[in-house]
Amino acid sequence: MSGIGTGRLLAWPAFLIAGLLGGIPMALVIACSLMKPGAFGGVEWGLSFDAYRALLFRRDIFSGEPVFSADHLLIYGRSILLAAGTTILCLAIGFPTAAHMATRPPRARKWWVLAITLPFWTSLLVRTLALMLIIGDQGLINGLLLRTGLIQAPVAMLHTNFAVLLGLVYSFLPFMVLPVFAALERLDPRLVEAGADLYAGRWRIAFLVILPNIRPGLVAGCLLVFLPALGSYVVPLMLGGGRAMMAGDLIALQFGGARNWPLGAAEAVALVTLVLAALLPCWLMRGRAG
Amino acid sequence: MQRHLPRAFGLVAGASLLFLYAPILVLGVFSFNSGRLFHRWEGGSLHWYAKALANEGFRGAAVNSLAVALGATLLATFLATGAVIGLHRAGARQQGIALALIGLPLVVPEVVMAVATLIFFSLLRGATGLDFGLGNLILAHAAFCLPFAMMPIRAALRGVEPAILTVAADLYASEGAIVRHILLPLLAPGIGSGAALAFITSFDDFAMSQLLAGPGQTTLPVFIWAQLRRPLTPEVNAMSAIMLAVSAAFICLALAMVARARFTNGPCDP
């Protein structure tokens, strides 16, 4: 067979592998969340909503009655707050950085983009470890402060919400800078000049000329930071150390030491639902824009 | 526009760069420290590198990491090239469905993808007894790297002048001949950088490897993570610095290939 048809066949292997190792496993997570935990990990066949009930209730040790437990709400709430805080901080640092980059000469711009992109392609684990060595009790900051005599005992920075927030901003800052930079670079400078010629002040130009024009870049940047931050695993695992847990760690825990697969699967479904809920307004807006 | 920019923006931009690079630099510098501390410089030495390279666990993990990354890269690049060429003639609807499925790892949190794959392989083993050993990890990584490998290949396809393909078809070149003699050579730099990105993505992956790797299948990031349970020495810096160097080499390779493609395509390139 020749003509248009043969080319399309080439896409099938990728489609099949993505379905086999992406689509089917995701469906299995949903199926697994509706079963009972097996004795040694894994699942027991049979429909059960216990895993979802366990997200909000735990069994009383003595009576066996379900009692409300805020443990899950606390961890998911912390995940949302930390992801939101990360997004705000990345925007506050990333926007000025992107604006500075966009106003450099073209050649310098390329170097800036390269410098901002490069860390993303190195191991997240190693970069998080580097932060750990700096803010740890025996780390660089505490070591220097102790030696100068400014403090007597190490300041506990590791394994706190602060450490996780720092780590998340550190990992996801490039995701904010690059789309905002791309939007600013596309902005026609004549618009800004026209605004200035018409005696608009700095703030009026920023809010009435620049902001509406770069909104898609800002939205993309916020999503690219918020979504991976919400589901992050390595950063809270290393910098939170069990004391500042996020949803991702909780899920992995059920498949490791805790051995409660259905609960872990239900937690995963809850996390993906949050991710989709954050994406929904953008899909709707894009649909309306055509 | 430049004259409207507050001067503080430049300072913030500089601080951003410092923030991104300072931890990596500190890690690198202290990997050459001769002492055991992370906050006191006691003279340069390659002692910790020698120790890391002599560590059997580290060497085994490095071999596993390279094997998995090479396998996943070959598979992902092959699949990604086929997908890009195959999808470019497909309708918008088919393209949308295929790209959504292939792009799943970009939207779903990595740890969810990892436990999903864990459930999949465990059920597969339970139902059919199939277990490919390190092959499980290679397959999982390939699916995970696929969307990253596709990015530069799709970018390269956008740079191909559509008239070339029309001319070839008008001259009775078969679909296969067009792919072999025109598309593949033109896409080669994109395919090369796609392969490099797939390699780094697999090589740096932690969550998937940590949850899937069985005994004896430890990869480098998982091995380094396991070191954190003991008292830390700069040996872990040396191991990390070696990993960073490998990633940096591959990202430079990817960028060099893209840059060369721009250069050879000359001024016609959009």
Image: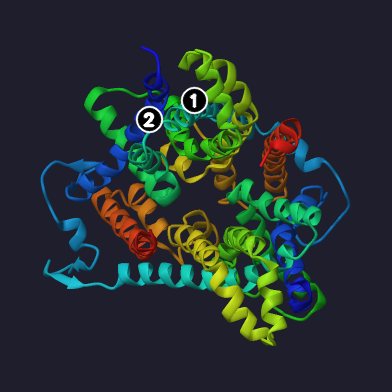
Counting labels gives 2
Q: Nearer the viewer, residue A14 or B260?
A: B260
Location of the C terminus of chain A by quadrant is: bottom left
- Which secondary structure, mark 1? helix
Above/below status of A68 relative to B65: below
Give coordinates of residue A169: x percent, y percent: 58, 65
Give coordinates of residue B180: x percent, y percent: 55, 16
Q: Within the image, what quadrant is residue A277 found in?
A: bottom left
Residue A99 at least partly seen: yes
Give the alpha-carbon distance from disc 1 to disc 2, as whole Å: 10 Å
Q: Classify residue A278 as left or right of residue A150.
A: left
Q: Nearer the viewer, residue A6 or B72?
A: A6
Q: Which mark is residue A17?
A: 2
Q: Classify residue B244 as left or right of residue A268.
A: right
Q: Nearer the viewer, residue A137 or B154?
A: B154
Give coordinates of residue B125: x percent, y percent: 29, 28
Location of the N terminus of chain A by quadrant is: top left
- Please state which amino acid type lies under the numbered disc 2: Ile
Pointer 1 indicates a residue of which chain? B
Neighbor class of circle 2 (other Cα within 10 Å; few <14, some 14-19, many 20+) is many
- Please state which amino acid type lies under the numbered disc 1: Leu
